[in-house]
Image (cartoon, rainbow, N blue to C red):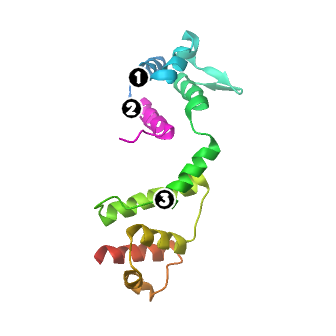
Amino acid sequence: MREKSFKTCCKELISWTMITERAPHAQVAMITLNLGGAAKELADMLTIQEQFFGAIVDGVQLEPVPYLIQGLQKRFAPLDEEARIAAMMEIMRFQRKGNEDFDSLVTRFDIARQKARSEGQFVMSIEGYTILLFSCIGMPTGHILEALQPLRGRLPRTQAQFEEILRYMRRM
């Protein structure tokens, strides 16, 4: 099983804090109890004062949970450049998973594309993404031309055209 990224863990943690009725200091205690290794050791170093009230960081008062997350982020989150490279490599190494259905493939592709754009500041032309997707599918040239029929054999140049090709491919 693939480990979750630091970013995913933080998103899940923030979601949990929004739905729990525990007080912030109790949230910090629960989070700390569920950590392991060096992360737990770091969280255990919070003072009682920090667990109850958080702390001031760079002139801003942070509540207990954001203060804990900020401390963990300093040590365990990937560096900005690492995150950028990982997001770009994810889209460039994108592959179909076994007998994955088309809708799941396209959904994962869109997620990887969005991640490359937002986290990697990586943008490719719609034509480039189309060719990349065809390549990931392993589509032979003859099938590519068939898939491009709605655009008279031309590659899509807009998002709307790209989506039109995807709708056509779903029916193929």
Q: For the stretch drawn in magenta, what is the main secondary structure? A: helix
Q: How many marks?
A: 3
* Quarter of the N terminus within the rendering: top left
Q: Position of residue 99 (x, y in %)?
A: 28, 61
Residue position marked by numbered label 3 in the rendering: 93
Of badges 1 and 2, the one in the foreground is 1
Which residue type carries mark 3?
Arg
Quadrant of residue 66 within the rendered picture:
top right
Q: Tell me where the magenta segment starts and ends, as one range.
A: 1-19
**Distance between the Cα atoms at labels 3 and 2?**
36 Å
Which residue type carries mark 1?
Asn
Q: Position of residue 78 (x, y in %)?
A: 58, 39
**Dot 2 alpha-carbon crowd within 10 angstroms: few under 14, some 14 to 19, many 20 or more:** few
Q: Nearer the viewer, residue 46 or 134?
A: 134
Q: Secondary structure at mark 3?
A: loop
Q: Which mark is residue 34?
A: 1
**Dot 3 alpha-carbon crowd within 10 angstroms: few under 14, some 14 to 19, many 20 or more:** few
